[in-house]
Amino acid sequence: MKTITVETKVNSGIDKIWDSWTKPEHIVKWNFAIPEWHCPRAENYLEVGKSFNYRMEAKDGSMGFDYEGTYTKIKSNAAIEYALSDGRKVNINFEKDGDAVSIIETFEVEDTNTLEQQKQGWQTILDNFKKYVESN
C-alpha cells in the first residue's frame, strides 16, 4: 500500500511533546486541519490493543467524522503505531534533535481524497501541533 510521510521539528522537550500528543485535554486544542474545524472530543487509551477516538467536525456543525483506531505499538517518548478503523496503518516517530524533537508521521493512503489533499491535511494538523506546543 502507498504511504505518505509528513514531518516537523518542534522546539520543546520530549515530555511536553508526548503529553501534548497523547492527552485528550491537549488533543482537542490542535487536532484539526483548517480554522473552520475543531476537535470537540478526544478519548485516548494509550496502551497496545486499546483504542482512541477523536471527533473532528466543522464548527458550524455541517459535517464531521470520528477519527479512530487501535494501538499496535507504543514506545514511550519515542514511537506510536496504530491501525485506523478502516485498516490503514500509521507510524509516528519522535526523535530527539538537540533541544528539539523531530516528529515523523507515515500513513497509508485512502482512496477518497487525492494524495496531495491527504498530505496537506496531515501536514497542517502536524503544523497545528507544533504551534500549540511551542506557544504553551
Image (spheres, rainbow, N blue to C red):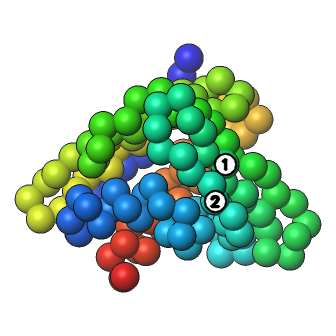
Q: Position of residue 56 (x, y in %)?
A: 72, 59
Q: Amino acid at mark 1?
A: Asn
Q: Is residue 20 left or right of residue 13?
A: right
Between the C-alphas of marks 1 and 2, the distance is 6 Å
Above-or-below relation of 25 to 7: below
Circle 2 residues within 10 Å: few <14, some 14–19, many ≥20: many
The structure residue drawn at horizontal position 82% and vertical position 57%, both measured from the top left corner, is 64
In the picture of the structure, the residue carrying the numbered disc 2 is 42
Q: Residue furthest left?
A: 98
Q: Residue furthest bottom?
A: 135
Are the residues at dot 1 and dot 2 in contact (C-beta closer than 8 Å)?
A: yes
| Residue 68 visible | yes
In the picture of the structure, the residue carrying the numbered disc 1 is 53
Q: Position of residue 127 (x, y in %)?
A: 44, 64
Q: Amino acid at mark 2?
A: Ala
Q: Which mark is residue 116?
A: none
